[in-house]
Image: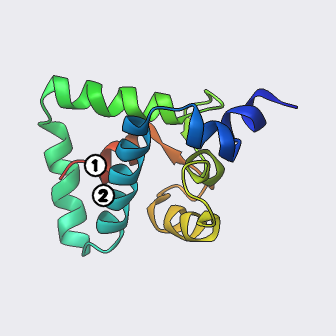
């Protein structure tokens, strides 16, 4: 098996990864859902706010992004978050379609920070 398959295995996620990580992921996905429902003006505000993020908040978001980026390619894909959500892969794919600004099927660090500014 590939390393990604092992790390994303449901048993590993449930029994090995820290509960704290799962809580963070659920919070991040909730923020992403909320961001996906924002009107264009609020999304523009998020871009402006991102420019004034405190360095500690930005570093925390970057750290979380890199922890979730199982493949380490600088892009989040639905299956990487799907490891934390049993039977939610379709919902995550739909969410990614809404948040993926450059339409490449994944979420970059920049797109991730945009969705977590508020």
On screen, 33 above or below 15?
below
Tag 2 secondary structure:
helix
Residue at numbered disc 1? 116
The reply, left or right, for residue 68 in relation to residue 105 is left
Counting the numbered discs, the total is: 2
On screen, 78 above or below 60?
below
Q: Position of residue 47 (x, y in %)?
A: 23, 51
On screen, 106 above or below 74?
below
Tag 1 secondary structure:
loop
The reply, left or right, for residue 33 in relation to residue 89 is left
Q: Position of residue 2 (x, y in %)?
A: 83, 30
Q: Are marks 2 and 1 in contact (CB under 8 Å)?
A: yes
- In depth, the one of 115 and 85 nearer the eye is 85
Q: Position of residue 1 (x, y in %)?
A: 88, 31
Q: Residue 8 sits in which quadrant? A: top right
| Residue at left offset 11%, top offset 36% | 52
Residue at numbered disc 2? 31
- In depth, the one of 110 and 35 nearer the eye is 35
Residue 106 is labelled as none
| Residue at left offset 55%, top offset 34% | 69
| Residue at left offset 54%, top offset 49% | 84
| Residue at left offset 30%, top offset 58% | 31
């Amino acid at each position: 098996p590939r390393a990604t398959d092992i790390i994303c295995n449901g048993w590993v996620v449930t029994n090995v990864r820290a509960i704290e990580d799962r809580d963070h992921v659920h919070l991040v996905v909730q923020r992403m859902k909320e961001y996906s429902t924002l009107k264009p003006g609020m999304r523009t505000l998020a871009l402006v706010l991102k420019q004034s993020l405190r360095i500690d908040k930005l570093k925390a978001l970057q750290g979380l992004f890199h922890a979730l980026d199982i493949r380490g390619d600088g892009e989040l894909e639905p299956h990487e978050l799907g490891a934390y959500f049993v039977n939610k892969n379709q919902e995550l794919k739909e969410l990614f379609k809404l948040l993926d600004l450059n339409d490449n099927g994944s979420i970059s660090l920049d797109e991730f920070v945009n969705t977590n500014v508020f």
